[in-house]
Amino acid sequence: QKEVEQNSGPLSVPEGAIASLNCTYSDRVSQSFFWYRQYSGKSPELIMSIYSNGDKEDGRFTAQLNKASQYVSLLIRDSQPSDSATYLCAVKSGGSYIPTFGRGTSLIVHP
Amino acid sequence: DGGITQSPKYLFRKEGQNVTLSCEQNLNHDAMYWYRQDPGQGLRLIYYSQIVNDFQKGDIAEGYSVSREKKESFPLTVTSAQKNPTAFYLCASSIEGTGPNSPLHFGNGTRLTVT
């Protein structure tokens, strides 16, 4: 059974701080990693995807992947109240490549 | 604009009734998926389809049925056999079928309440 683990939170950070969201996965042959943001009552929207070890930056967002340690993280710099949402980690592995989702981490950015 | 349209947004049904949720996409994506989300839970896969006239069960297919007669459409029927149907249902699609680097794009969801 492929597992994707996230701390449910809530993670509370002050406005302007760096928010760090973490995700671990169990399947060593996982190849693709995605971060989605989901506002309350809304559907998930893709923020970042990462496929290789290291960092990938897009604006205020940085995804970090470490396949040896089987974790992927999302850093949000200069956090804004509008970043308050649940962040879902999704992992695709070999074989069927159907993504497995974590339960998500709730982020609260307070003014 | 291209996208995925789910309808209706809210759906109310009496226990024992079958109900069909609509999902249409104009992104020309090959693969389509149905997920269920319960409060505080992640997304659980119900069914997926890589090509027209073919679909596969996901992790929680019992009590659900689907069809894929057209590339653009992937309706989900929640049958009376589904014991706890009240949930938020999400339809998604991806461009490369189930290729490794293809992210999912989601519709806006249908919130089903069964009483």
Image: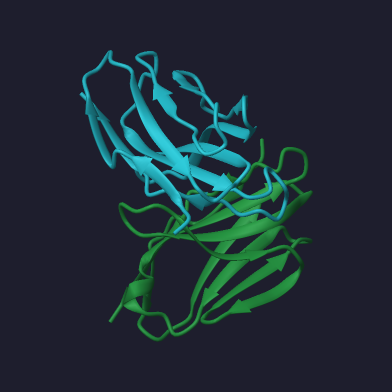
**The N terminus of chain B - image quarter:** bottom left
Please tell me which residue is depicted at 51% across the width and 45% down the height of the picture: B92
Q: Colour of chain B?
A: cyan
Q: Position of residue A103 (x, y in %)?
A: 48, 49
Residue A82 position, x and y percent, is 34, 73
Q: Can you give x and y, in whole percent of width and height, for residue A66 in the image? A: 73, 66
Q: Position of residue A50 (x, y in %)?
A: 68, 65
Question: Is B61 in front, or is A110?
Answer: B61
Which quarter of the rendered picture does the C terminus of chain B lie within?
top left
The color scheme shown is by chain
Picture quadrant of residue B57: top right
Comparing B95 with B43, the one in front is B95
Q: Quadrant of residue B85?
A: top left
Rendered view: B20 above or below A50: above
| Total numbered labels | 0
Chain green in the figure, letter? A
Q: Is B53 placed above or below A35 here?
A: above
Q: Quadrant of residue B50?
A: top right
Residue placed at 44% from the left, 85% from the top? A78
What residue sits 66% from the left and 75% below the top?
A: A56
A57 with respect to B13 (left or right): right
* Image vertical order of residue A68 relative to residue B90, above or below: below
Query: Quick check: B54 left or right of B89?
Result: right
Tell me the residue at 61%/33% (across/down). Answer: B49
Q: Nearer the viewer, residue B56 or A63?
A: B56
